[in-house]
Amino acid sequence: MTLHSKTIRKAVLLSEGSSLTAREALTVLAQGGVDVDILSSSGFAITAFSKWKRRIIRVANVNREPENYLSTVSKLIKSGEYAALIPTHEQAWLFAEEKATLPKGNRIPVAAREAFVRVQGKIAFAKLADEIGIPQPRWERLRPGVSLGLQFPCWLKADYGTAGRSVYKLNCPEEIVKGVTALSPDGGGLMLQEHTEGRYGQVQAVFDRGSLIGVHTSLQCGVGAGGSSATRVSVDVPQIIEHIRRLGTHIDWHGGLTLDFIEHDGSPFYLECNARMVEPGNAALAGVNFPELLMGLAAGEAPEKLLVGKPGVKTHSTMGLLLGTAEKTKSRKAVMRLFLQSLRSKGVFEGSTEVLTPWKKDPRSSIPMLAVLLQLLLRPGKADKLATLAVENYCVLPQTIQRLRRKNSKTA
């Protein structure tokens, strides 16, 4: 899809700057000639270390001061400076909830609040998957005094969470208390799901009011912190495309949507839904530019035919692989060995393109990667803390949404 000139004259605003998705979206947009401004509550966001950003706009932390964050967003929308405000994380949920308080014609490509309710939580998504008949591992809600129908090992999951930090593997019944304490001390909002062996993957899509306009599928071939995909290879699986099309059409989705799945014996089993765009670098190299598609939606534009990512495109995040290696091995030697492989494009890096910190084209992007490497060499056991350090700067907590709902109900 080629955007009209009237669309690309203006800059694009990203909803936050600390997530991996924001960093990859910046790269994709900037390399397409788009000026990018970024909202951030942190002066050390990963997107700050790039020659491609136009400016970082400091904003209140969305969970501590959501009203102030939304006030800044409204002022920027009214300025008329931006062709689109692209949600790069769970701010999409916030914008859907607060649509009535935002300026009309806000150019934020997000679905209706009612659609978010169906997919934002893991339990809600599991119910929806059963309703529309897309495959998923067996699951049940964790309820006090109710015997478990699942066998061990299985996964305990918090209803809301991100960055691979909201799941806990249970190998036996005795571990349930420990898992509940780790994920939800009050025991609320938890589900159990059977363990399924296979290869982890994601299918990413953009919908135009229920109509699928772009889709891309990838499989994990290198593990980052928290089990994330630090290396991906693109695939083309018509069955998976049909599944996400069925879901998005059923709830009249608008904007970005991503499903996580496990491929087992050639079939996908869906684990959860991210109600937004996720890390678009691999898809862009495979021919589906999700930030551009979202920019087009904001201007009322869409491609004439469905865009599908071509298979065989391999990408990686060196920083993600370093964190994943340190988390798994706790070994300085393993971390250093991996870093040297990255410099020589050997091992997991062979035939792959860096999409998170493309330091050859954007030298400043190497700064956060080298800072992480140094800290891991000093304390390899610090990987988990480093991986979750920025989460508060980009996640929107369910408590924040609930607080705003209560406030809105009182003033209605």
Image: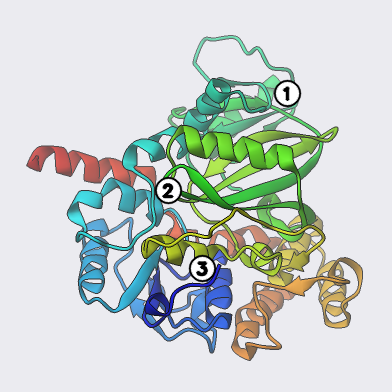
Question: Circle 1 — which element?
Answer: loop
User: Please, which colouring scheme is shown?
Assistant: rainbow
List x then y, in percent, for residue 319. Answer: 69, 71
Query: On the image, which quarter does residue 325 sit in?
Result: bottom right
Q: Position of residue 101 (x, y in %)?
A: 18, 54
Tell whether label 2 touches label 1 (CB within 8 Å). no
10 Å neighbourhood of mark 2: few (<14), some, or many (≥20)? many
- Residue in view at x 74 percent, y 28 percent: 171
Q: CA distance from mark 1 to mark 2?
A: 41 Å
Residue at mark 3 to residue at mark 2: CA–CA distance:
15 Å
Q: Nearer the viewer, mark 1 or mark 2?
A: 2
Q: CA distance from mark 3 to mark 1?
A: 46 Å
Residue occupying image coordinates x 47% and y 84%? 53
Of circles 3 and 1, the one toward us is: 3
Quarter the N terminus occupies: bottom right
402 above or below 141?
below
Which label sits on residue 292?
3
Q: Earlier in the sequence, mark 1 or mark 2?
A: 1
Query: Of callouts 3 and 1, which one flags the residue occurring earlier in the amino acid sequence?
Result: 1
Contact, mark 3 vs mark 2 (Cβ under 8 Å): no
* Local crowd size for mark 1, using a 10 Å CA cut-off: few (<14), some (14–19), many (≥20): few
**Residue at the spot 68% in from the left edge and 85% down from the top edge:** 359
Q: What SS does tag 2 mark?
A: loop
Q: Nearer the viewer, residue 118 or 244?
A: 244
Q: Which residue position is annotated with label 1?
A: 172
Residue 254 - label: 2
Q: Position of residue 80 (x, y in %)?
A: 24, 76
Is the C terminus in the top left, top right, bottom left or bottom right quadrant?
top left
Relative to 150, is 317 above or below? below
Please indicate, yes or no, whether residue 184 appears anywhere in the rendered image. no
Does 117 sit above or below residue 86? above
